[in-house]
Image: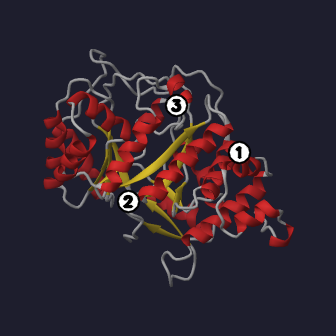
Amino acid sequence: MGVICSEALDELEQKVWDGRRIGPAEARRLYDLPLEALGALADRRRQLAKADHYEGRGNEIATYSVDRNINYTNVCNVYCKFCAFYRVEGDADAYVISVAELDRKIEETIAHGGTQILLQGGHHPKLPLSWYLDLLNHIKSRFPQINIHGFSPSEFIHFRDLFKLPLDDIISQFVKAGLGSIPGGGGEILVDRVRRRVSPRKAMTDDWLEVMDVAHRLGLNSSATMMFGHVETIEDRIEHLDRVRVQQDKSGGFTAFIGWTFQADHTRLRAPMVGAHEYLRTQALSRVYLDNFDNVQSSWVTQGPEIGQIALKYGANDLGSIMLEENVVSKAGTIHHMSVADMRRLIAELGYEPHQRDNWYRLVD
């Protein structure tokens, strides 16, 4: 990608180049730039965001993590149209994970150098609160070196409604039992009109943001996500970014932003999937708009390793996880695999130093 000379930039592009904040209308204008030009601005914002990180290392670095997605149940009663993973009670392949299976998966993760598990599940209508607390206590006592990155905001809203307890109380109990951080799953598009079309029984926008606000106040960090490329408009994507940016201004607890595209196979949501150019364009705009986020993660899981690599030149500074296990996206027909060697090669090919990191973007290698 060629470097854009600051003299050649118009007033808005110069504003981005200088690192100043833009608004929604300006973001909409930027979205229509040639892809290469928008990518260069996003790469500039990446450099500005990471300028004070890993100081004294010389070369620029890009990071990756080693973890595993563990879905503790696929039983779910919200029936999202974009999901091919969920099952209802009574389905032949419905399950709740056993302790023995959970331990085996975590042991394999540690053997591969993993530092974290991503623990998520469906909205099971019958598991009691004690089941979740016992699960967390077991993991933390047996595997104290593993960070439990678990339970998306929509799950916590489900717990709030099912157990009739305030969010502060529930999240505090989960932290005491061993929860270390919260993933941004279930973000989809943070515009209620869109959410009512694709997941009407799931947490709405203010609910999702409230969970993050409570978690951040209690000292937990979380990630923020966006699943795009289905029934939303470009303006909806920008509104999503704005809601997340406002929350970050308020509580400062988001460690990273991760965007990915809707995968349609085996789902009930009929919408045209977008391609790699649309993915790169939206990620680049996200980096520019989210000026209070240090980290943007590429999505090789949905885009494949090659586009995941290219995304490191479109605002991302992190290649994500090797994902020893992934069940949700793969159920929708998209299956890609990467090893640590693959990750390191893809990063090094771009001239960056590859480094493994933990959930808080601290280097662990």
Mark yes or no: residue 69 visible: yes
Query: In the structure shown, which secondary structural element does the residue marked by tag 2 occupy?
Result: loop
- Determine whether 241 is above or below 329 in the image: below
Please state the horizontal and vertical placement of residue 333, each as a whole percent of the image. 52, 31
Task: Spot the residue most to the front.
Answer: 250
Distance from the alpha carbon under mark 1 to that under mark 3: 26 Å
Could you tell me how many numbered marks the image carries?
3
Of residues 161 and 221, the one drawn nearer to the viewer in this rendering: 161
* Spatial CA span between label 2 and label 1: 28 Å
**Which residue is depicted at the point 71% across and 45% down?**
277
The amino acid at mark 2 is Asn
Question: Disc 1, disc 3: CB below 8 Å?
Answer: no
Q: Which mark is residue 335?
A: none
Identify the amino acid type marked 3: Asp
Residue 192 numbered tag: 3
107 relative to 120 in the view: left or right: left
The percent position of residue 137, horizontal first and vertical second, equals 14, 48
Dot 2 alpha-carbon crowd within 10 angstroms: few under 14, some 14 to 19, many 20 or more = many
Q: Nearer the N terminus, badge 3 or badge 2? A: 3
Question: Would you place residue 357 above or below residue 202 in this image?
Answer: below
Q: Position of residue 177 (x, y in %)?
A: 17, 50
To which quarter of the image does residue 36 belong? Answer: bottom right
Residue under circle 2? 359
* Nearer to me, 80 or 254: 254
Which mark is in front, 1 or 3? 3
Q: What residue is shown with label 1?
A: 277
Horizontally, residue 235 falls left or right of residue 347, namely right
Q: Report the amino acid beneath label 1.
A: His
Residue 361 lies, with reference to residue 127, above or below; the image says: below
Residue 18 lies, in percent from the top left, at 70, 70
For mark 1, give the secondary structure: helix
The secondary element bearing badge 3 is classed as helix
